[in-house]
Image (tube, rainbow, N blue to C red):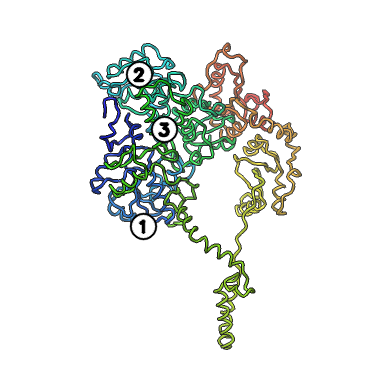
Amino acid sequence: MKRDGSLPLAQVTHIISNTIDFPQYTDTTAMMIPVVKTKWIMVSVAKGRQAQLRPFTPDPRMIFSDVILSCADIPSSDKETIIGATMAMGGMDSDNVTKLTTHICALSMDHPKCKLAVEKGLKCKIVLPHWFDDCFKLGKRIDESPYLLPNPEILRAGPKDGVKVPSSQHLEGATSAQPEYLPARTDDIASAPPKLAVFRDKKVLLSADLSIRSRLRDIILDLITSGGGAMTDDVDECDWFICQYRDGEQYVRAAQAGKTVGNLSWLYHLITRNEWTSPLRRLLHYPIPRDGIPGFQDKVITVSNYGGEARIYLENLIIAAGATFTKTMKNDNTHLITARDNSEKCEAARDWNIDMVNHLWIEESYAKCEMQSLTVAKYTHFPPRTNLSEVIGQTFLDEAKLRAMYYPGEADNLGATSKRKRKILEMADENSFSEGPAQGVAIGRQAHKEFDVMKDSDAEYAQKTTEAFGVPAPKERRAAEFATPARKRHVRAGKENETPSTVSSSRSAKDVAMNRLSVLAPDIALYEKEKKRGAKDGHGLWGGKRAADFIDRENLNRRSLSSPSVAGKDNDDDDDEIAAERRPAKKHKPTLPEITMRVVLTGFKRWVDDKHREDADRKKLRDLGIAVVPDGQSCDYLVAPHMVRTVKFLRNLSKGATILSSSWIEECLDTKSIPDPQDYVLKDTENEKRFGFKLAASVRKARENKGKLLRNVPIYCTASIKNGPLGYQAIAEANGAIFKVYNARSGTTIRPTRPGEDESGPDPVYLLSTTNPEEKKLWVRFEDMARKGNMEPRVVASDWLLDVVMKQELSFDEKYLVSNFF
């Protein structure tokens, strides 16, 4: 290595490193010098020649770089796709199980490979193919534990069973782009800590947009100078440029000149760890866009199933992207980012038609400087027994996209060193994979004396590499694209035909099938032509009727004529055979009609205690194009015998669904036809008089309210209320309310506010309660909390909420106060 930190191209052929976090990695990518792990040396020595490079790259984006795979009882087509894609992502394939094998892909433990691994106590993991499927879909390597045979968790656990939230290993020092303080060094000891070697011979420029105090600036200056570095105010002289935002003359010039650009969070990370890392490695180590990412300005996003540093990181990333982050979910949220497809927020997102994605969507949108499409499968994929926070923080920034968006072109009057750095960055981008799971990865070239990287073409390089090492040259671009189809249902042991498809590669079943079809195409065309020819033209022996049937009938006729006795004896059997041959093929059952109506039923008594009848009736309705959907899903009609104050009735009334009488469903089932729903609109004058409203008017108002009748109205509910708080929560949140459960351990959840600080008068806050002695104890504390927050406390019976939602009018009468109601 030269004194300026660059690499001597003429002398270096390989770099041995177990990480890509060193300053010269971009140079190696530009020069196509391979970076390999120490294990590559041992394998090469054992083989007596240089081993392939791909399985030994330290780049974490090659997710299977340390996987040695052996497939067991997997269908051949799936086996080829799994092996091909695993090798493309850095893994290796082994026909036999050895001590080096790390994974066996199997459907059960009955295969000899699995038995051998168990008998010899090998450390390899026996996994279902679902693990590879999920890894390929996400482009990330997730934990194998839920997929391990003989008792995989994904086949025995229910969808609502809890999953432990893992720690986030890739977010240390990178949860915020604006750190509030300088963290303590990890190498601090009782005596004076060692000097910071990371700043040696480096010139650092702190931008004015950091807005740091003079005392903190002096501390940073002392750390840099004591570590052998220096501070400068000249962009052209600096090595590292530290700023907060991706704008300004200094930022553009530093970025165009190829300087290392990072933010204060990145600088603190270097000071804390005393190890160099690229600011492009972690999203919040690079300056943030002042106006966010285009398209995020009107987005309101919340998160679910993330905890600890991962939740803080996502909150800061959402804000940095320009969107609004909310801790609680409301019906005006546009997106839900969740680590699992199971939580109360997930159910609400489905109910309110809010887009639900995993964190890869926001990470890759931020990394690529543009909002990514929600139709990309990996953004909406949730492995059943995995909390995706285990793979958070692994997305790298795309330098090419940053350059195109924030510092296009080339700066004027650049020095020779700056021009060289800019050229190296461009060459590194050209030598890396441009898209797919391994985007940004560069494998490098196996070097030899006869090859000149600056002169020889790719074809000459491939020829010389093959001659020198007896192995093919690694290609600069992938030969095939990878695409991952949707997951099939769970595979149980012994059912090979239910193995999920994974990814397509150059060795995939898709390519094999296409090759076979191209060979068989002339025969298929000839067969289709001959099939149309009839027997009457004299050339139809192989036409519309099978030749085998024709020959059998001819033989049968000869036997009948030549041997009457035998014919009579075997007549019955022959008739049976002929009848079987002439029996028409079994017709395929026609597909179900398209769903034209989705209905939710409540109070429907026809199916009470009669599961068989319910199943049969549901099937009849489905044959008519009517789907009975569970509560919470979008529906066209709500069917009820009369007005009821159930959760189903009130939630779907709040959506503005048309409410029909149960007799409509009865008529559909009895006549096997669909009468006009408008003739069966529910009319219940008795209950309308009882509750004092008109149902038709409530439905009309609900459609006008669009689920926002109680928007931003705070409603509390005692934990011990009759029938539990969950039903009231569903009803309140379906109308946009802020719902909280209030119990003895609840703290102050209303921010104390003085009357002068509130422009408007005190807003009401409601507590649903009964006169139960345990609930009465909470009233005084609740009222005190509300008044300190300049709000009007109202302790009411739950009937207030039910009547408000039933009428679709926000009103209040003192008769609902618990002191008057009970």
Mark 3–mark 2 distance (CA, rounded to whole Å): 27 Å
**Residue 783 vs residue 663, the one in the foreground:** 663
- Could you say where residue 447 lies in the image, as x and y percent from the top left? 29, 41
What residue would you read off at disc 3? Answer: 396
Displayed quadrant of residue 413: top left
Q: Nearer the viewer, mark 3 or mark 1?
A: 3
Secondary structure beneath label 3? loop
Q: Is residue 485 above or below residue 175?
A: below
Callout 1, which amino acid?
A: His
* Mark 2–mark 1 CB contact (< 8 Å): no
- Could you say where residue 772 lies in the image, as x and y percent from the top left? 57, 29
Decide if residue 185 is on the left or right side of residue 318.
left
Q: Residues within 10 Å of mark 1 (few under 14, many from 20)?
A: few
Residue 75 is marked as none
Callout 2, which amino acid?
A: Glu
Tell which residue pokes out farthest to the front in this image. 455
Q: Quadrant of the N terminus?
A: top left
- Could you say where residue 791 lies in the image, as x and y percent from the top left? 59, 18
Mark 3–mark 1 distance (CA, rounded to whole Å): 40 Å
What residue would you read off at disc 1? Answer: 111
Decide if residue 379 is on the left or right side of residue 278.
right
Secondary structure beneath label 2? loop
Secondary structure beneath label 1? loop
- Could you say where residue 468 lies in the image, as x and y percent from the top left? 28, 47
What residue would you read off at disc 2? Answer: 237
**Residue 172 vs residue 527, the one in the foreground:** 527
> Residue drawn 46% across and 43% down?
137
